[in-house]
Image (cartoon, rainbow, N blue to C red):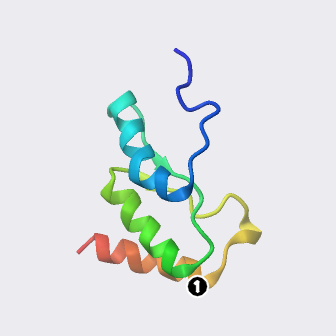
């Protein structure tokens, strides 16, 4: 089966709003769906984490590179996950 996402360019909000749901529609629950790298601003990181899980993602990719990790962004991830788990 051809990869339906090859060559598709989506901004972060489109990916969160439509990409995860579209992916789930295509594959069902035959594989885990993880949202990609998060934005750089802690407020946007928080929103992206909440949106990712609300859209049905099974997980998130906090950073593709260790040196990109920033404490304020990791704190925002933690706040979002704690809020989601309530």
Is residue 42 left or right of 48 when viewed as pictured? Answer: right
Residue 25 location (% of width, % of height): 33, 33
Residue farthest to the top, as pictured: 1
Residue that sits furthest to the left in the current view: 86
Image location (x, y in percent) of residue 38: 57, 64
- Crowding at mark 1 (Cα within 10 Å: few <14, some 14-19, many 20+): some
Residue at figure coordinates x 52%, y 26% from the top left: 4
Residue 23 appears left or right of 42? left
Quick check: 21 left or right of 59? left
Dot 1 falls on a residue whose secondary structure is helix
Please state the total of marks drawn on the protein image.
Answer: 1
Give me the residue at 62% from left, 83% from top: 71
Pick the front one: 4 or 58: 4
Q: What is the x, y in percent for residue 46?
A: 45, 75
In this figure, which residue is indicated by the disc labeled 1? 72
The front one of 9 and 72 is 9
> Taking 3 as reference, is 31 above or below it?
below
Quadrant assignment, res 84: bottom left
The residue most toward the right is 67
Q: Quadrant of the C terminus?
A: bottom left
Relative height, residue 74 to residue 39 (above, below): below
| Viewer-proximal residue among 41 and 74 | 41
The residue drawn where x is 56% and y is 47% is: 10
Residue ID at (31%, 58%): 54
């Amino acid at each position: 089966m051809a990869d339906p996402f090859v060559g598709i360019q989506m901004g972060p909000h489109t990916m969160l709003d439509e990409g995860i749901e579209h992916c789930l529609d295509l594959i069902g629950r035959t594989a885990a769906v993880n949202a990609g790298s998060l934005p750089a601003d802690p407020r946007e990181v928080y929103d992206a984490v909440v949106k990712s899980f609300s859209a049905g993602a099974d997980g998130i990719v906090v950073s593709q590179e260790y040196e990109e990790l920033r404490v304020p962004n990791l704190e925002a991830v933690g706040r979002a996950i704690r809020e989601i788990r309530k």
